[in-house]
Image (cartoon, rainbow, N blue to C red):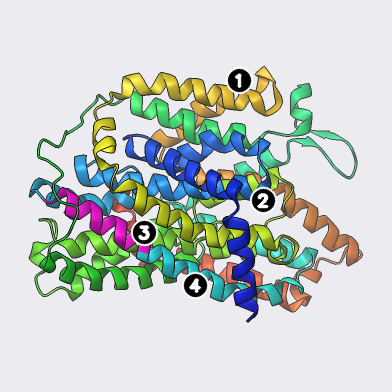
Amino acid sequence: MEILDHLLLGFEVALSVQNLAYCLLGCLLGTLIGVLPGIGPVPTIAMLLPITYVLPPVAGLIMLAGIYYGAAYGGSTTAILVALPGETSAVVTVLDGHQMARNGRAGAALAIAALGSFFAGCVATLVIAGFAPPLAEVAFKFGPAEYFSLMVLGLVGAVVLASGSLPKAICMILLGLLLGMVGTDVNSGVARYDFGIPELQDGIDFAAVAMGVFGFAEIMSNLELRDKRVNLTSKVGTLYPNKQEFKEAWPAVVRGTAIGCCLGILPGGGAVLSSFASYTMEKKVSKNPERFGKGHPAGLAGPESANNAGSQAAFIPLLTLGIPGNAVTALMIGAMMIHNIQPGPQVMSSHPDLFWGMIVSMWIGNLMLVILNLPLVGLWVKLLNVPYRILFPAILVFCTIGVYTLNYNVFDIYMTAAFGLVGYIWSKLKCEGAPLLLGLVLGPMMEENFRRALLLARGDFTTFVTRPLSMWLLVAAAILIVLVALPSIRKKREEAFVDED
């Protein structure tokens, strides 16, 4: 009954006229930008993050979630129609989805991807609702020591989710922690690492870093490439899968949903590993593995369902423990901090309207995407013909205006441009930006809780291991480090991400 009451609260929040409008706006914006090659969900949310400054917290986060789902749907549309994945997790979608399109079954492929993603989203929403109450009980046992240990676990998770080498991921996290120390110390009032620049005394703005590293750097990377679009010459055709396609797709949808829910909950799991794991599973259980890569419906349905389920299941550690599973959820943490909402276990008890409203909005957003995207597929096909050289000036102007309106300070534009240049260099060095962003977000919170824990323990450092919950969180982080450092697991991890490069 308690879960039912919470869900009713969620429906009350999510079905308000304002939140429905922002959910719809987020889905449309996300799909629009996700369809366009070269712009994925991470740069999209980074670019639109400033908009949430002027919105109520619930409406802002619901809109960002809608952008996330919309961009993911748009990415699959691009992958199916023109073999250009809008995001990393859609790489697997290209293998069989685009082949179905080339075989004249583009409409059926789009329908399978959309319906499979919707089913996976519904199941993942129920999983989130089921996991929430037990974790809410744990929330009341968290003190400063537990919060610090939890954030250590989150940073270790960032190493796991990074697709590059482990040393590079660790370096990026440390750099993010150092950037988080820039500004005035809250306790002493002493300016740290500001180099005499007054604008840095308030710290480095999270949105400027996110937009620079993900937005501006993405533009620079895409400008290197010529427009190599492969336009779909054949018609999209009917949106209804035939009986054989339906028969082959739905078992894969169920398996992909289960894989996505399991891997999405784990720190560093998320959509990418879920989609790759689902495709591997479908090939192993198939009686005709040679059909994969030639337009097999199961090769499309499984990864797309796992992708969506993994993306939504990643909200479980995000909303309940404050641990992001990917770059998008790291940006969501930044959006929560913008509205002075402390990410972590207390969100469920201190902001139940936000927590349950977000959960219900996930289901509503997926429903909106199915209703909107399939009838509008002709519009998305036309958008694919827009050259990137026309798009990037508009994106650049939009980003610049968004950064400036945060504090109405030109220095923020310079900061974003600087991080864009640095982010471009990092992309060349294959250093992922997500761990840096997570270190920047969690760094100040870690420092604050570290100081509080030592103050309460009168300077006794053993407080982090003598408190049982804190100790087990640190043990979990240590086990994760040992596992990811093992040669066999490291090799499997590299194999899982090899298609991303």
On whether residue 113 falls in the magenta region, the answer is: yes
Q: How far across and down, in percent of the image, does residue 154 sit?
A: 60, 59
Q: Residue at x 69, y 63 (%)?
A: 352
Q: Does residue 341 lie above or below 36 as drawn?
A: below
The image quarter containing residue 302 is bottom left
Q: Amino acid at mark 4?
A: Val
Residues 358 and 216: in front is 358
Can residue 134 be seen at all in this image of the molecule?
Answer: no
Instruction: Read off the residue under disc 2.
Output: 442
Label whose residue precedes the other's in the sequence (4 or 3): 4
Q: Pointers 1 and 4 in contact (CB under 8 A)? A: no
Q: Pointers 4 and 3 in contact (CB under 8 A)? A: no
Q: How far across and down, in percent of the image, does residue 309 sit?
A: 41, 63
How far apart in space, not on screen, are marks 4 and 2 (Cα)? Answer: 26 Å
Tag 3, which secondary structure?
A: helix
Instruction: Read off the residue under disc 3.
Output: 307
Label whose residue precedes the other's in the sequence (1 or 4): 4
